[in-house]
Image: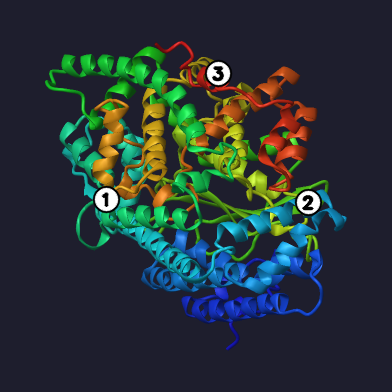
Amino acid sequence: MKNPLLQDWTTPYEMPPFGDITDDHFEEAVDAALDEARANVAAIADSDAAPTFANTIEALERADETLGRVLGVFYTLAGTDANDRREALSRAFSPKLSAYGSEIASNAALFARIETLWQDRDTLDLTDEQARLLYLTRRSFVRRGAELDGIAKDRLAQVMQRLGALGVQFSQNLLADEREWVMELGEDDLDGLPEWLVEAARAAGEEKGRKGPVITLSRSLIVPFLQFSSRRDLREAAHSAWTARGANGGSTDNRDIAAEILALREERAGLLGYDSFAEFKLETEMAGTPEAVRDLLMKVWEPARAKAVEDQQRLSAMMHNDGVNGELEPWDWRYYSEKRRAEEHDLDDSALKPYLQLDRMIEAAMDCANRLFGLEFAPVDVPLYHPDVRAWEVTRDGRHMAIFLGDYFARGSKRSGAWCSAMRSQQKLTGDIRPIVMNVCNFAKPPKGKPALLSYDDARTLFHEFGHALHQMLSDVTYESISGTSVARDFVELPSQLYEHWLEVPEVLEKYATHAETGEAMPREMLDRLLAANTYDMGFSTVEYVGSALVDLEFHAGEAPEDPMAFQAEVLDGIEMPRAIGMRHATPHFAHVFSGDGYSSGYYSYMWSEVMDADAFAAFKEAGGPFDAETAQKLERHILSAGGSQDAQEAYVAFRGRMPGVDALLKGRGLDDAA
């Protein structure tokens, strides 16, 4: 039987034929695609023809097209619906793919052709996009060791192969810990829990094969449990399990893996001539240097910590008034903060959540995209990989723009968190290729027949990931390697964080925040209270984030620590981390940093982008409103459609006219007057 992964797909919109694909197909397909890619690269490198942009750079763009298509399907399944076979395949593919990457980077004949084009670039009559692609291609080869030789080149290949394997293992260990922990709740354990949370816990119990409600390590279950459970002992047990992910001993413990990853990254940077991995990594980002990142984070840290310490004192007093002695602990913060929010802003999550239905929030995100960019979304029947996944065709003025997939519910086979990815990216080199874009979330699945209800934070996550999706959908470049979200890491979060602001637009909530049972719109006074509380507890959320970002930076800014946990504690002590607040992502489960290279030395990027997103949304306000057509057109032209075809700072300045300062961020977080 022919392997469907290696055939032309005749499905609607050339979607992967998931119904025909089995796990048995992947190994053969990846091996065949690697062989094809190697042959294509060899044909480029060994060509007798003089190097041209077309026969070298553009040919490289097409060389591994089949491999990208196969891996797009595989990693979609491995991340959203893992099983033992897929995890084994991930471990098997990692060294193969690393070896392939090293072979390309160390191909002297290939790099010589690229170098010839680089030296002759002023005579090639390149478009701006082609000139940018040539620059980025050469830079990528140099940063992967193309200028090394002998022992150093061989050692770098070994380091990269080992790093790939460790990243896969880190991720799989974390998923295993998240999948295995369950806390069953008896009737006496439900004190304080709102009915919607009990129902979600019962649905989680059914998914786990348990008779009653359970709390799992899904964020959409454990966070509200910590907010509402009046059982301090259960809150402590749940919080301890949540923070212990990847640090439980045994075969899934990530602490030694993190130490080895940090040591190998330091060695990698040294082989390439850098003083630290942070210097190597940040060279290509907007920030540029570790010093610039540290400066930004500390400007935010001081007012955030002051606010958090003030809040800690107030929450401690509330706890003592309840007759609980001792100090406020991390498993107490959310519980008393929720009580304080109800008192100060008259906001009860139990009353608020029925107005934030998942389906209505999806409609809201899509309607904003229609008003801003003219996009229209229509459900379509296409092959999908799981019953929970939904699909829409995205069009504009009748033109097909993308297929958008939404995979919203938590399950034990899905890695935690939320993300956007593209099974197929936009490009025009081989035709008008439009993307297949996915948003993946981990919202609590409701009982059958009941609507899924979101917290306001969940709704913000939905808008955030949809902003990433727009970056992919609206991409309009020739070359896939610079399309969509293929931009500097500290620029990639700008579209996503900017899009969150439309959730705060009153007219959006007035239309789409409707009650799950009555269908009535959220009362205006409740909406006003919700928006007024938008910066509530911002000291806590900023401190837990910046603490994580500073630990990530310091991990990579000097000599790799032998004991990452001790080093983490040292960094947090040095900045006087409030004792009742932990890192958002402690080292053993810091997947952003250790599951791959993406956010290593780069977790700060959310805040770097936030400096811009606060300023960018202000551009709409200055122009007359959140749906100003001219400003939306500028945003699309200079940022959303441009991908990585220009320098990130130049792109932002083209949109806004200047770069912003940190003041807008502090004001947006309500920290501008913190002591």
- Looking at the image, residue 582 lies above or below residue 242: above
State left or right for residue 96 relative to residue 658: left
Give the distance between the C-alpha atoms of the residues marked 1 and 2, in whole angstroms.
Answer: 44 Å
Q: Residue furthest bottom?
A: 1
- Amino acid type indicated by mark 3: Asp
For label 1, the crowd category at 10 Å Cα-Cα, with few meaning under 14, some 14 to 19 and many 20 or more, is some
Mark 2 Cα shell of 10 Å, populated few (<14), some (14-19), many (≥20): some
Q: Horizontal and vertical percent for residue 507? A: 64, 23
Q: Which residue is mark 3?
A: 663
CB atoms at circles 3 and 1 under 8 Å apart? no
At x 81% / y 77%, what residue is drawn?
49
Left or right? Give the position of 436 relative to 90.
right
Question: Badge 2 is on which residue?
Answer: 129
**Marks 3 and 1, how far apart in space?**
38 Å
- Mark linked to residue 359: none
Does residue 398 sit above or below 81 in this rendering?
above
Contact between labelled residues 2 and 1, with CB atoms less than 8 Å apart: no
Q: Please tell me whether mark 3 sits on a helix, a strand or a loop.
A: helix
Cα–Cα span, label 3 and label 2: 34 Å
**Which quarter shows the C terminus?**
top left
Mark 3 or 1 closer to N-term?
A: 1
Give me the residue at 70% from left, 25% from top.
658
Q: Quadrant of residue 341?
A: top left
- Mark 3 Cα within 10 Å, few/some/many (few <14, many 20+)? some
Q: Earlier in the sequence, mark 1 or mark 2?
A: 2
Residue 162, horizontal then vertical, whole percent = 40, 66
Circle 1 residue = 562
**Dot 1 lies on which element?**
loop
Front-most of residues 181 and 121: 121
Which quarter of the rendering shows the N terminus?
Answer: bottom right
Which is in the foreground here, disc 1 or disc 2? Answer: 1
